[in-house]
Image (cartoon, grey):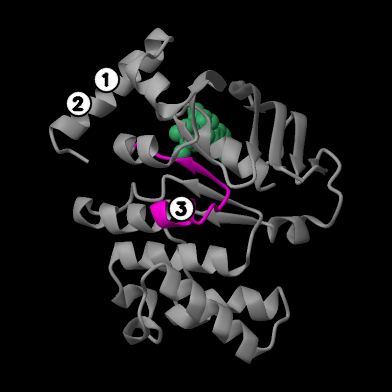
Amino acid sequence: MDEVLRVENLWKSYGETSVLRGVSFEVKRGEVKVIMGPSGAGKSTLLRCINLLVKPDRGRILLEGREIYPKPYDAIHRIRQRIGFVFQSFNLFLHMTVLDNVRVGLVKVKKLSKEEATKIAIEALRMVGIGPELWNKYPAQLSGGQQQRVAIARAIAMNPSIMLMDEPTSALDPELVGEVLNVIRDLAARRMTMVIVTHEIDFAIDVADEILVIDDGKIVERGKPQEIISNPKHPRTRRFLERLKRRVDHGLR
Ligand SMILES: Nc1ncnc2c1ncn2[C@@H]1O[C@H](COP(=O)(O)OP(=O)(O)O)[C@@H](O)[C@H]1O
Ligand SMILES: [Mg+2]
């Protein structure tokens, strides 16, 4: 199956607020889609719908050709194992060491032996550049960049079909953004299938096979990074991208 994710005509409202208004896109294996768009556009809601954390009002979602919404082919907790999620705010277990954070899902959810889980966890930690000197530390003893890299390791250790990342660097101090973006670049180079919400425009140009611009609950523009950046068709996209570029020029990231 070449298509990992298909989202068809997704709608979601909160009371009177219409948040998603007919969103459709697809992600093939090994592809990286970057979602951009102003605050409040519905980006987080879209990712949360795909991960079945939020129930859409209407539409259809397929994972590897099988419907997960409205009629999930399997129990939701098992479907969620196929989808890695990286949050803005790391979401590590604060009372667990780095190694346990990465290992816990493998032991508790995948029912692997501690030995097998440790092997896979260490491999994932190495992939994100977290060395042995940090494996027995607690999240509070790590920098934000290190914490986010552990969170990414925890997600990849589960061997998901797709990774969803919701502004993975926007809670970080500027000097720590680069190390996390490099880890994600590395995953892209390894052909990890990903949907990434980010405002990091240079990074988006680097990794995205396609950029989707969402505004007011709709995809208003989509295409190859160079097309979108150099020749945005939609006036709001143009204004939005110009604001981002100004932030880059002024070093305000
Ligand atoms: N749980 C919720 N209840 C009510 N309104 C929500 C909820 N989550 C999001 N919204 C609203 O939906 C809109 C889109 O939010 P969100 O998906 O977080 O946008 P983005 O991630 O693009 O900034 C916003 O107006 C937000 O206030
Ligand atoms: Mg958001």
Q: Which residues are magenta?
A: 185-199
Q: Position of residue 37 (x, y in %)?
A: 43, 27
**Residue at the disc numbered 3:** 189
Q: Position of residue 156 (x, y in %)?
A: 55, 64
Q: Residue at x 40, y 30 (%)?
A: 39
Q: Residue at x 61, y 83 (%)?
A: 117
Q: For the residues labelled 2 and 1, say whether their Cβ atoms are less than 8 Å apart.
A: yes
Q: Is residue 189 a member of the stretch shown in magenta?
A: yes
In the image, is 214 to the left or to the right of 47? left
Residue 2 higher or lower than 181, as above or below: above
**Residue at the disc numbered 1:** 242
Q: For the residues labelled 1 and 3, say whether their Cβ atoms are less than 8 Å apart.
A: no
Tag 2: Cα neighbours inside 10 Å, few (<14), some, or many (≥20)?
few
Secondary structure category for the residue under label 1? helix
User: In the rendered image, is residue 80 in sight?
Assistant: yes
Secondary structure category for the residue under label 3? helix
Tag 3: Cα neighbours inside 10 Å, few (<14), some, or many (≥20)?
few
Q: For the residues labelled 3 and 2, say whether their Cβ atoms are less than 8 Å apart.
A: no
Q: Nearer the viewer, mark 1 or mark 3?
A: 3
Measure how far apart labels 3 and 2 are at the Cα level.
Answer: 28 Å
Measure how far apart labels 2 and 1 are at the Cα level.
Answer: 6 Å
User: In the rendered image, is residue 87 in sight?
Assistant: no
**Residue at the disc numbered 2:** 246
Q: Quadrant of residue 19?
A: top right
